[in-house]
Amino acid sequence: MAQPQMPASRNWRFEIDIEGIGWLTIDTPKAPVNTLSREAIVELDRFVERFEELIASGELIGVVLQSAKDSGFIAGADVTEFDDMSDPGVLAAALGRAHALMHRIEALKAPMVATIHGFCLGGGLELALACRYRIAVNDDKTRVGFPEVNLGIFPGFGGTGRSIRRAGPVDAMQIMLTGRMVKASAAKRMGLVDKLVRHRDGLRWAGRQAVLAKSASREAPWTKRMMAWDPIRSYVAGRMRTEASKKARPEHYPAPFALIDLFEKSGDDWKAMSAGEPTGFVPLMANDTARNLRRVFFLSEGLKKQGVRGVDKPVFRRVHVIGAGVMGGDIAAWCALRGMGVTLQDLDMERIAQALVRAKKLFSKRLKSKTEIDNAVARLEADPTGKGLARADVVIEAVVEKLEIKHKIFVEAEARTRPGAILATNTSSIELERIAEGLVNPSRLIGLHFFNPVAQLPLVEVIRSKFNTDLDIARGASFALAIGKSPVVVKSAPGFLVNRVLMPYMLGAVQRVEAGASKEQIDAAAVAFGMPMGPIELMDTVGLDVGRAVAEELGSKVPSEGQFMRLIAENKLGRKTGEGFYKWVDGKPVKGEVPPHADLAGFGRELVHPLVETAINATAEGVVASDDLADIGVILGTGFAPFLGGPLQARKHGRA
């Protein structure tokens, strides 16, 4: 049939079928995901104006909004434009245009239906919420949420009020405050999605049916909405602030608290809440926290572009891990969780059995169904004799930091593995050149240094020795990406990057404790500065024995007497033994009162000073290739305050 004349567009395609249903497809050019750039919003506004005309003439009975990308619906606004929009005048005008567009979509005289697969995030979800009805594919790939808080802002296209209108204040505020993405089934339970289909192929038919039936979303029931009514709302807002304060300080991360303020003021009127967004959003976008979090976002995304590309991209199916201790066992469990077949080797079944128990706990926590858990358990095999070596695509050694033991392991592994398999050590500090001595082909050995706890910390240092080629390291980075980790390439040097910067920080704190300082005050000061945990708690988490071994490998001075060495002698090694500097109960340290301090954050800055100085020195020596890689490596490996942008960025701006 003849198509009506439509506006020119780079981001959208449109056609009307014989029934008068319009099919609007977003396809961001030259990009793996769809984003709502300023250009896309301007173009969409022109389309909506044309829709109004076609609806009035009777040519158009409704519109189905869909995505041409396999990756999903819309991943949000175009973050690359955020720096240009930090000017308050420019941003306020852009928000005004976006709000007006969402109102026009909402006010269309015919239904507009959003059909969702894959990612529907941020501005993409705000656009979907402005539509009259939302249909999503009910599979593991579909994810719905508002990740804006991770960039130091909150939803700004009217999504605050519209999400509360559909999901109620508690559910809507929770996903906005946490940045958590939810599956399609959870989104439907909340009211963010109206209908589910099993497969992407079913979206078109379901969208057509929704237009013909003039389907419309329902508001959240009054039992949910009442949590935003007076006087309950002030109490709810207070509870939200308390919970948010447990995870972030308002001076470090103001966005969650600004959102709560907006809710407390206008949460009982979804239109007023949406209209109030720019007042809080504009100053957030321009502050240091948001700028630094954007930088961290781009650096993290940059890590995903490493590895082998194209037809030579390796496929990893089987992993063999040698060493079933805390690190080895947890690396094996993580690889199995990510879908790899894993064999786990140690001296006897008793050691392996403990790792298998921990692995099942991880699977039970991360996976939903019994079938998924059972499948993960089946992918992780005990292998005390090392039969899995011959089949492995990747071999990871994670035994004690003793050079002679590592030598023996890799000489045997080289002889028993196929030539193309990656040989990797999880050593935390020993140079690879020393470990590779005695290998026929020392270039096969790379470092894959994971961090404890493996399931929580995203960084893997990919260690490069003088023997390795670019391809060797790219294959290591590809493996890290394949198991959902973030690889940072580091030169083989004592302590590499993260442990090198951590040791002077942690040992300096230990020396203060030895001199009589309060460990609770030291840890509280580091947290007040912006660290996720204090250096004494971190030493307990890493393990006092590991801390000593790394310190000695780095040539750092370790006191021969005092509490630190006494605890090691008594096998009080920290979290893994139930006691170190702290006693540990149910995986958490038991802490006493924190003595008062006139400037706790300032004290924290003083504590962190050795870490910052060492990071600067390591970068200058070429341990990593750039300041950017040093910053993202230290953030991902130590939890260094993301709102400061990393240690080098913080020093550059006089904040560390």
Image: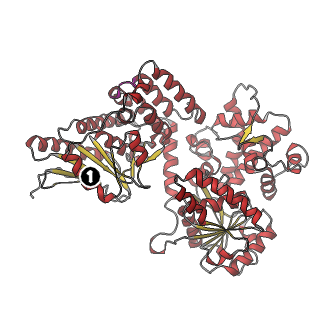
Q: Which residues are magenta?
A: 266-270
Quadrant the C terminus occupies: top right
Main structural element of the magenta stretch: helix, strand or loop?
Answer: loop
Q: Provide residue 464's location: percent of width, then percent of height.
A: 64, 67
Q: Nearer the viewer, residue 270 or 635?
A: 270
Q: Provide residue 588's location: percent of width, then percent of height.
A: 71, 41
Amino acid at dot 1 = Ala
Q: Name the residue rendered at 59%, 46% in the picture.
A: 646
Give left or right: position of 64 versus 489. left
Quadrant the N terminus occupies: bottom left
- 276 to 113, vertically: above or below: above
Q: How many marks?
A: 1
Q: Name the residue rendered at 28%, 43% in the picture.
A: 133
Look at mark 1 in the image and give the residue it sits on. Answer: 206
Circle 1 crowding by C-alpha within 10 Å: few under 14, some 14–19, many from 20: some
Q: Provide residue 560's location: percent of width, then percent of height.
A: 90, 49
